[in-house]
Image (cartoon, rainbow, N blue to C red):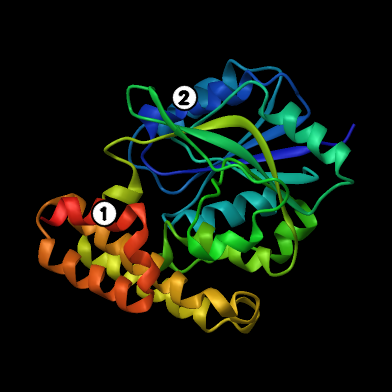
Amino acid sequence: MSILFSIIIPTFNRANFIKNTIESILLQDYDNYELIVVDDGSADNTKEIVNSIIENNSKTKINYIHQKNSERGVARNNGLKASIGEYVMYMDSDDTLYQNHLSVANEFILNNKSPEVFHLRYDLKNQELKKYGEAPIYKTTANKDLIFGNFLSCNGVVIRKDIALENQFEENRAMATVEDWHLWLRLAVKYPIYYCNTITSSIINHEGRSVVTTDKDKLILRFDTFMQSVLSNPSITSYYSKHLNKFKASCFSYISLHLALTGKNKADALTYLFKSIKASKSFLFTKRFFAILRRII
């Protein structure tokens, strides 16, 4: 029997998380899958932990790949090239799956005639594993709202392998942590991104998560590079032509919020807050606007 799912985990210095992540995968109630761990040059004992799991596992095919540190876009693409599944999914190494993740994915494929791309819903937990939120609900597809922000999780996105090979992650290091949003936008202009409202995974927010630890200059460079790439893509700008100002506002406000959260970049946070308002006046009526304002005042 051919492998249906390839779960690809890029990881870098996540030895204190990856065991729980892998164990949540090994508890799946659907077993036609392989697991590929791509170690992006970790300096901790990630390799030993993964190899220990492999040695004690006789049921699931687990492949450990070590690469020179090149960022997660490269790691995900290398995992994709090594995969043999009909569908691929990219798991973050500090998150977890519920036991039904793959069975729900399999059922969705069967009921929707082998869709190119779809997304399974997730919840949000803090580092004490207390649930505090859930992903939005969509009746059919998620395409139209993706320009406003990245509400899809890598854990939840399932891509048919032939489509994934034709649409790989951006490997520019400057775009690390937004390379997934970049890919979703490129996919959205080509295929319907179907949405399944069953929750099958958890995003674990913790102090060491990469999206909250980047310094100011890297954060600004990341979104400058990202916006330039998106706005120079004619397929994306044509598809989302009426909403590009809101896209800019979303990016500027993300910078503003994360600068404000540090508590030491209030002037810069205010600058990007004004950029957001200038890009789209409707930003004044969003929850993020008031969240930033509370942090700056």
User: What is the C-alpha distance between the residues marked 1 and 2?
Assistant: 38 Å
**Along the horizontal axis of the image, is 138 left or right of 181?**
right
Res. 214 visible in picture: no
Res. 156 visible in picture: yes
Amino acid on which the number 1 mark rests in the picture: Phe
Upstream in sequence: badge 1 or badge 2 = 2
Q: Residue at x 59, y 24 (%)?
A: 98
Q: Quadrant of residue 215?
A: bottom left
**Along the horizontal axis of the image, is 269 left or right of 101?**
left
Secondary structure of the residue carrying tag 2 is helix
Q: Residue at x 56, y 22 (%)?
A: 24
| Disc 1: CA contacts within 10 A as few (<14), some (14-19) or many (>=20) | some
- Asked whether disc 1 touches disc 2, contact meaning CB atoms under 8 Å apart, the reply is no
Residue 291 against residue 52 in the figure, above or below: below
Instruction: Name the residue beneath numbered marker 1.
Output: 290
Residue 130 against residue 76 in the figure, above or below: above
Q: Residue at x 23, y 55 (%)?
A: 292
**Along the horizontal axis of the image, is 28 left or right of 211?**
right
Q: Residue at x 75, y 23 (%)?
A: 30
Name the mark nearer the viewer: 1 or 2.
1
Q: Quadrant of residue 282?
A: bottom left
Instruction: Name the residue beneath numbered marker 2.
Output: 19
